[in-house]
Image (spheres, rainbow, N blue to C red):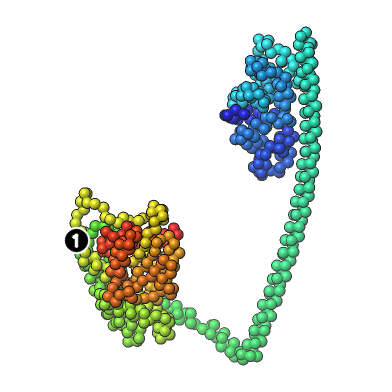
């Protein structure tokens, strides 16, 4: 075949339309073309080949697959097979010189198709050149009477196509006789192939009839199975209804005979069902709602709470700014301190308002103790100790679930608030940032935005990872939202679980928490370590421990990544760490995102 097997749409259309349905069916049987694509939406049968859509799919497949088109042109059952047999009579040199004259007589397109399937390279190349044309395949070429050098060839082709044979012309009679013999042999071969195709068609039709019979049998079996399924469902529904009725009857009998539920008791139950309790509760809700509206109208505690919420939101925005910025303006720290003092003042006033309405119970004593914790490191340590004391479920047994939940929520809020204040004090203690100079060198540690990509860049080197636990929990919404009556126990457990799943990608992972809490699992598993700074040293906090650990690892030649958004801690280890990872980026990697 030529190197460039390109055929025009007009050529492929003429070739396919020149074939009968039986011829196409015979070709598809041996061609290897995907029948499920060609007969998609139709039955794969001889009758479907008369469908225009199916023929268009055959044309598309032949135009896309030059190898299939080559097999199509050389198939012995095609209409141009006789023309191909006639071409074999002539030698290649004569055909190369006279092929244009052959094409300008009746049946010229059949001769072109035969040339495209010829085994001789020069003839084959000219046949495929004709297949790339467009206008040639729209109508037969007009003959030229001046083509006298191919007259004898034209007369031979006429004899091949069934026209009356011309009279012998002297020296050409022997050649015509030889041609007739070869044509007769080709006709016999064609009949043989036609008989074989007929037998194949009969087999295909028998197979189609068998398939249709099996399809009908399967349809009958499916209908029978559906009928049985409906009958089984009806029987099941009937048995279920009878069973439920029997259960209700025996339950009523048991209540009367064993439990002594008499008609009097059942009457009491009916009276309770008809009691106006729901109406009373609705009335209480309406009264409470009107009372709240009255408080709003006169500007009582609700106004104080609204102002406190607004200030807390502004304080959170300032904390984000201080924690995320490389350079911090001095006035930002001053403004953060002013907002913090105002928040503390309003929280104190709110505590006084709540204390004024307290009933002196155990729950109010716990709440007053929590709110009275001073906003410093001692107050934070006192709340951590209280959290350990309240661990377990004994508080719910003493106060009830509602009051115990209120106490635990107040403890978590106050503890987190004091931890945030300690962070702000650490930031305020840092020296004021100098204006940035264009020539200043970049920091020693860079930001690792994509943890997975950073690991790939390191290749065989695995970094050592140290995580500021509570800083990450406070900055990750999915962990911060898990804070409940048990404080930070649940988010700690989940963070350790995430780190354990990803520990294999790092040289080692250490998660550091403030205080002396504990997790339910062992503190050291494989290359994952969970550390509580106060347990490691009585006077130590998480920041000091992390600085010491980073110094130790860096001296040992490890590549150290630090996970924190604490600006002060970052400044302390900036010359030691190889990279910093933000809380959101670390959580995204740990969760597999």
Residue bearing mark 1: 432
Q: How crowded is mark 1: few (under 14 residues within 10 Å), some or many (20 or more)?
A: some
Q: In which quarter of the image is residue 156?
A: top right
Q: Quadrant of residue 182?
A: top right
Image vertical order of residue 83 relative to residue 155, above or below = below
Name the one closer to the observer, 62 or 220: 62
Whether residue 474 sits left or right of residue 521 in the image: it is left
In the rendering, at what x and y percent does residue 287 appear?
Answer: 39, 78
Percent position of residue 520, x then y:
43, 75
Q: Is mark 1 on a helix, strand or loop?
A: loop
Work out which quarter of the rendered image holds the C terminus and state it.
bottom left
Q: Residue at x 67, y 20 (%)?
A: 108
Q: Where is residue 142 in the image (x, y as percent from the top left)?
A: 65, 16
Which residue in the rendered view is the most extreme toward the front? 556
Image quarter hosting the N terminus: top right
Whether residue 177 is situated above or below residue 235 in the rendered picture: above
Name the quadrant containing residue 267: bottom right
Percent of width and height locating residue 186: 77, 25
> In the picture provided, is 114 more to the left or to the right than 543?
right
- What residue lies at 62% left-to-right and 36% top-to-bottom? 61
Seen from the viewer's position, the closer of residues 477 and 256 is 477
Q: Judge left or right: residue 8 versus residue 462.
A: right
Q: Which residue lies furthest to the top in this view?
A: 170
């Amino acid at each position: 075949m030529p190197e460039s097997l390109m055929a025009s749409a007009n050529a492929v259309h003429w070739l396919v339309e020149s074939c009968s349905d039986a011829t196409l069916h015979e070709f598809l049987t041996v061609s290897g073309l995907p029948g499920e694509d060609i007969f998609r939406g139709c039955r794969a049968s001889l009758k479907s080949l008369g469908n225009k859509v199916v023929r268009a799919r055959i044309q598309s497949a032949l135009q896309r697959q030059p190898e299939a088109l080559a097999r199509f042109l050389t198939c012995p059952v095609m209409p141009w097979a006789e023309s191909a047999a006639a071409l074999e009579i002539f030698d290649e040199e004569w055909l190369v010189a006279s092929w244009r004259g052959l094409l300008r007589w009746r049946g010229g397109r059949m001769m072109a198709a035969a040339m495209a399937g010829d085994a001789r390279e020069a003839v084959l190349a000219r046949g495929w050149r004709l297949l790339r044309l467009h206008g040639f395949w729209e109508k037969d070429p007009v003959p030229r009477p001046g083509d006298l050098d191919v007259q004898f060839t034209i007369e031979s082709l006429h004899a091949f196509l069934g026209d009356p044979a011309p009279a012998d012309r002297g020296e050409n009679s022997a050649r015509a006789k030889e041609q007739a013999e070869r044509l007769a042999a080709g006709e016999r071969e064609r009949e043989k192939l036609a008989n074989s195709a007929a037998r194949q068609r009969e087999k295909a039709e028998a197979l189609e009839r068998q398939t249709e019979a099996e399809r009908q049998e399967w349809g009958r079996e499916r209908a029978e199975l559906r009928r049985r399924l409906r009958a089984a469902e009806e029987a099941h529904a009937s048995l279920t209804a009878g069973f439920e009725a029997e259960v209700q009857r025996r339950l009523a009998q048991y209540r009367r005979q064993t439990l002594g539920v008499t008609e009097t008791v059942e009457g009491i139950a009916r009276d309770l069902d008809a009691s106006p309790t729901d109406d009373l509760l609705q009335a209480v809700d309406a009264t409470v709602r009107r009372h709240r509206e009255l408080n709003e109208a006169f500007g009582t505690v609700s106004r104080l709470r609204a102002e406190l919420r607004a200030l807390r939101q502004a304080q959170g925005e300032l904390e984000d700014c201080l924690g995320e910025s490389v350079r911090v303006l001095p006035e930002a720290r001053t403004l953060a301190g002013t907002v913090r003092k105002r928040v503390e003042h309003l929280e104190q006033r709110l505590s006084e308002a709540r204390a004024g309405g307290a009933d002196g119970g155990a729950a109010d004593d716990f709440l007053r103790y929590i709110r009275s914790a001073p906003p410093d490191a001692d107050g934070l340590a006192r709340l951590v100790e209280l959290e350990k004391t309240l661990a377990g479920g004994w508080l719910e047994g003493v106060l009830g679930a509602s009051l115990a939940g209120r106490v635990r929520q107040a403890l978590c809020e106050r503890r987190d608030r004091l931890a945030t204040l300690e962070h702000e004090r650490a930031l305020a203690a840092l020296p004021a940032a100098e204006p940035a100079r264009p020539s200043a060198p970049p920091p020693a540690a860079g930001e690792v935005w994509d943890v997975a990509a950073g690991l790939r860049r390191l290749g065989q080197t695995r970094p050592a990872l140290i995580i500021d636990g509570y800083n990450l929990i406070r900055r990750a919404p999915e962990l911060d939202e898990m804070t409940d009556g048990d404080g930070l126990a649940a988010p700690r457990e989940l963070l350790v679980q995430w780190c354990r799943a990803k520990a294999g990608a790092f040289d080692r992972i250490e998660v550091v928490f403030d205080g002396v809490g504990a997790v339910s699992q062992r503190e050291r598993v494989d290359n994952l370590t969970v550390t509580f700074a106060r347990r490691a040293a009585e006077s130590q906090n998480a920041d000091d421990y992390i600085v010491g650990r980073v110094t130790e690892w860096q001296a040992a030649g490890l590549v150290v990544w630090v996970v924190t958004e604490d600006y002060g801690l970052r400044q302390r280890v900036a010359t030691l760490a190889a990279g910093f990872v933000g809380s959101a980026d670390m959580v995204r990697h740990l969760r597999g995102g």
